Image (spheres, coloured by chain):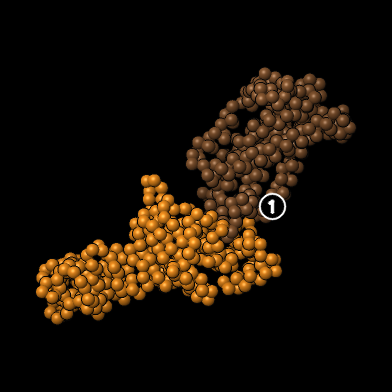
Amino acid sequence: MKKRGMGRYIFLALIAPGVLFITVFMLIPLFWVILSTFQEGGSFSLNNYISLLDSVYFRQVFGRSVRLSLLSTGLCALLGFPAAYYISRYSRHKGMMMALAIFPMFTSPVIRSFSWMVILGRKGIVNQALVGLGLFARPQSLLYNEFSMTVGFVQLFLPQMILSLLGVMDAIPTDLTEAAGSLGATRLVAFLRIVFPLSVSGLVTGAVLVFTGCMTAYTTPQLLGATDTQVLSTMVYQYAMSLRDWAQASAVAMVMIVVTLAVSTLFNRLSRRINPLAA
Amino acid sequence: MPLLELRNITAGYDRNIILRGFNLEVEKGEFVSLLGSSGCGKTTTLRLIAGFSEPNEGSIIFGGRDITHVPLHRRNFGFVFQSYALFPHMTVFDNVAFGLKMRKVPKAEMRKRVMDMLALVDLEGFEDRYPREMSGGQRQRVALARAMVIQPDLMLFDEPLSNLDAKLRVRMRVEIRRIQQELGFTAIYVTHDQEECFAISDKVAIMNQGVIEQMDTPANIFNGPKTEFIARFVGFENFFDLKAEGGAWLTDSGAPIRLTQRTEGSAVKACIRPEDVLIGPPDAGFENSVPGEVLVSTFLGRHVQYNVRTAIGEFAVKAEQDHVYSIGAQVSLGLIANKIIPIPQTNC
């Protein structure tokens, strides 16, 4: 009994610093932000949200944010699935391939965005190739639009998708695909019927990571986008820093949190329908 | 003509060749076991037949057709895994129906065949369960049903019972044998469990270091091992040299030994099981008598095992415990003539 009591105190002592830190620097400020969005002139009000939803501009930005995030998530899934499958099943130098996949994560998003500015610029390698091959007469504007933002997002978050998928794929025994093969399934069918459904939980984890990442990323849309391609995160900055409208900025932040949670829940529901056993 | 034939197979990686010039023939309807310790190449052989991997050299002939490079999904062989390899996200029904779906069998017929097969393996009423809700024995029966429902031309078993407890293992092997005889399929069964494979098989192929040392019926292997390796494998523990002199067989110390088996050659290695050696006082007067001294006596319940030092080597003897000899006792061993198995030296 005595030992158990001691263990309890030690347990509390061990988690206390972390809990305290999160409470003081995250939960309380977050609570304040939430509270402040429902106030105007010291009394309860929904005006912050009403004026947001009334604004055509906000609805545009909101739509763009969700659209680009979903598109980037989809592209990451499309690119990440074969990559993860290859690394997990066929790669001889697995550690090396994994290192290559996550290597971009060692570079800051700012540097990576600047690199894209060089690559996608009017005199960048892509435009030179397009013109050189005779596909276009003049350099195309590939920068400061939704295209460059999507490219930036995908490159930024693809490693998360690959890692999440690798985690579940490595746990799928090769026996299962062999069993499917011996029962008459081609490699493709075995992949679609066995590997894919069993990888869905990793796909969902990856999708949630990529989607939230895209929704909340700031430097990438700021550097690779333009004033007419604002997203929610750059909008928060604009409201808070340029317009000094903290209440409105907080309301936008709230919208971001709600959307992120909603989409994560949706992804989870979806995965349960494909694979009822996915946790 | 055999149903399945492996001709001159070489398999493995550059530095680790597992099979070299390997041959095997299996007749239609036979239940053949590949028996051997781990690393002997038995699982490699089975995986080659299944089509999970391809040999570096040689060919696999099935029903007169070369299937060496036929991909696994076109072979129509059933495979039962040690790990069961059930699809965890599918119900028992969907697991068993998988092969039929691949063959585009009509729904109604599929349902009937799956249900019949589940009845055969005694799993009626389990069709809506998921594999994780079942015990090891039940899972292996699902795996069995899933492999058999496609009416395979050949059933392959890769140590299917080694994850089960001892009691269940015995029950399941009887079950497998019963179903095999009921449906009459040809089977190749890989195991390292000697008792299991002797109980279940028509023929046993004992493998050692990538070659088949002997392939025969269980009784023939048990009573007439062809090599010392196999003799040790099936429980012979006492080995001694004999040489022919003037129409009789003599031990190294010159004592005559009578054999009942006709034996050619001028020298053989002979072996005998511990339970076929008699032990008595020095003046017991046994046939094929060898004097010795008890080194160790071990109580084994119904038996007592003695290790006895003799002039022709140490003998293990398993005796009834009616008279117990203590360590250091002078005894005489009697080698029962028709239980002595001569192994031709050329095969050693």
Helix, strand or loop at label 1? It is helix
Q: Could you tell me residue B163's position as x and y percent? A: 48, 62
* Residue lying furthest top: A123
Q: Nearer the viewer, residue A21 or A255?
A: A255
For image coordinates 64% across by 34% down, the residue present is A157
Q: Quadrant of the N terminus of chain B?
A: bottom left
Q: Could you tell me residue B45's position as x and y percent? A: 43, 58
Colour used to depict chain B in the structure image:
orange
For image coordinates 69% across by 52% down, the residue present is A274
Left or right: B17 as drawn, with respect to B298: right
Image quadrant where residue A240 sits: top right
Q: Could you tell me residue B213's position as x and y percent? A: 33, 63
- Identify residue for label 1: A274
For image coordinates 63% across by 70% down, the residue present is B113
Left or right: B205 as drawn, with respect to B112: left
Q: Is residue A208 above or below residue B288?
A: above
Q: Nearer the viewer, residue A20 or B285?
A: B285
Image quadrant where residue B192 sits: bottom left
The chain letter for the residue carrying disc 1 is: A
Q: Could you tell me residue A210's position as x and y percent? A: 67, 37
Q: Nearer the viewer, residue B166 or A117?
A: A117
Q: Residues within 10 Å of mark 1 (few under 14, many from 20)?
A: some
Residue type (three-letter) at the residue carrying disc 1: Ile
Colour used to depict chain A in the structure image:
brown
Residue B298 seen in the current view: no
